[in-house]
Amino acid sequence: MKKLINVLMIALVGIFFQSCGNPKKMAERADEVAVNCDPQVLEVVANKIKTNVTVTFPADFFHPKAIVEAIPALVYDGGEVLLDPIMLQGEDITENYQTVPEAGTTLNKTLEFDYVPGMEKSHLELRMTVIYKEDRIPFVEPYKLADGANTTYMLVKQNGTLAYAPDAYQAVIPEQNEAQILYLINSSNVRSSQLKSDEIKAFQEFLVNLKADERRELVNTEVIAYASPDGKEDFNATLSEKRAKTATEAFNKKINNKNVAIETSVDTKNIEEDWQGFSELVSNSNIEDKELILRVLQMYSDPAVREKEIKNMSQVYTTLKKDILPELRRARFIANIEFTNYTNEELVALVDQNIEILDEEALLRAATLVKENETKLSIYNKAIEKYNSDRAIINKAIVLLNMNKNEEAATVLAQTADKNCPYYQNTLGVIALRNGNIAEAETAFKKANIDAAKANLGVVAILKGDYTSAVSQLKGTKSFNEALAQILTNNLTAASNILKDAKCPCKNYLKAIIAARQGKVEEANAALEIAKGDEALAARAENDIEFAKIR
């Protein structure tokens, strides 16, 4: 009897070792292994799917002489993607794999897949196989880790924000017309010959004709009297005041009268010593030592010191006395005019009727006033032809981009001479963005540093997965992309505020996502119904994990 009991015990021990000590039995105990995934809904970020997987092997599970091959697999409509196997080994194995002790352990692995279209509808699984000697024993079933992949960031609008190079067209242009009279040295008497000069006659004629000029209007008149910067300062101060008085009297008698018919108030002032006029006349002269004279003016601000230093240059001073100083003993008669430029309606009409008379600024403005792209192109072509206008080149490229002629736009834009122009850089960045050259686009937008480029950097940030930066860059644009950035950072209230008046399918698609995340089924379906007016969005919604809970 005792012998029989011993035999039975030996048999039971054998069975135990066969069931628990045999590496081949690990696969049958698969349910004892805990496998988790974070996040459980995969998310595509910057065209990558990253997730963290945690595997816990309990005590007495991993046989010291066993190897386990774990293969992460992302299965989707159209195929599957397998990552390199994760190799694990028992304590008695001498391969260069990660060791799992008999006492059990928890392993953490980060998995990364390149996104492939179709992965929106997918699942992630971990396939394990026990390897013992020559045998391969797969676990009964793979471990299912996650369902679906969120691709919401891919809704970002990548056409880019374009910014036309601005014109400097002025609706009202300030103009001046003037004449001057000269005085003898140290005198404030106005000579009759000065009032009969051709210059004064031309000034009078201009003012007479001004009355018939519908586009020009006299704003005011000025008389400014000067003393030349030689002699004592206090004497010159008194002298310039006297000249201002006599010049104003002469102006009112000769010009500001019924014959000329301006009869306007006159602003009178005097400049004690005309150092600015002196500097300008010297700069424009052929005086041999003019650079030395100008240097003296820069070095000294005290008028007395200036005069002394210049007089020390005896030969030069003789020339100054003869050719420069007499021209500074003067009074200027100035008429300030406002010229009313072409109205918008006139510009548009002139494009058809007489485009040749339009200058560069007028052409650039006219192009903004017409709707047809072909007309815009013809105007920009004229500005390029006549003025080789960089701004017209940039704006022509923008029109072509609006027509989705991207390659042609790139060819035109390359003709821009000033590659540092912010509007050139922004347009260059948009072309790169549309071509998928994200790094090149980002570089150009940073160089541009204008509002449009800032919004475009927000798009780049979304594509790179930096959603916080995207919110900052797009803030205040109230655009689709700003709402998307808010959703990607889970700021659903902010996104809703941007989209509250949305009527188009694409913005309603975002509204549907917000409502679905908030569990508002009816609201989500109502927005989705509008969004499905766009065939592409309707097809996307079928597999979008955002709507898994409301289907």
Image (cartoon, grey):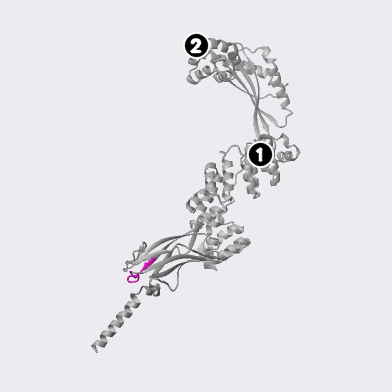
Question: Residue shown at 66%/39% (left/top)?
Answer: 364
Residue 355 image point, x, y percent: 73, 37
Q: Quadrant of the C terminus?
A: bottom right
Q: Is residue 19 magenta?
A: no
Query: Which residue reaches farthest right?
Result: 353
Quarter of the image with the N terminus in it:
bottom left
Read off the magenta span: 55-64
Q: Which residue is mark 2?
A: 312
For this view, does 385 lie left or right of residue 67?
Answer: right
Front one among 217 and 125? 125
Side of 57 relative to 285 (left or right): left
* Residue nearer the viewer, 48 or 253: 48
- Which image quarter: residue 27? bottom left
Amino acid at circle 1: Leu
Q: Is residue 45 above or below residue 364?
A: below
Which corner quadrant of the image does residue 539 belong to? bottom right
> How many residues crowd around disc 2 within 10 Å: few (fewer than 14), some, or many (20 or more)?
few
- The residue where tag 1 is placed is 364
Q: Is residue 307 visible?
A: yes
Residue placed furthest toward the bottom:
1
Amino acid type, mark 2 = Asn
Q: Residue placed at 65% from the left, 49% from the top?
A: 405
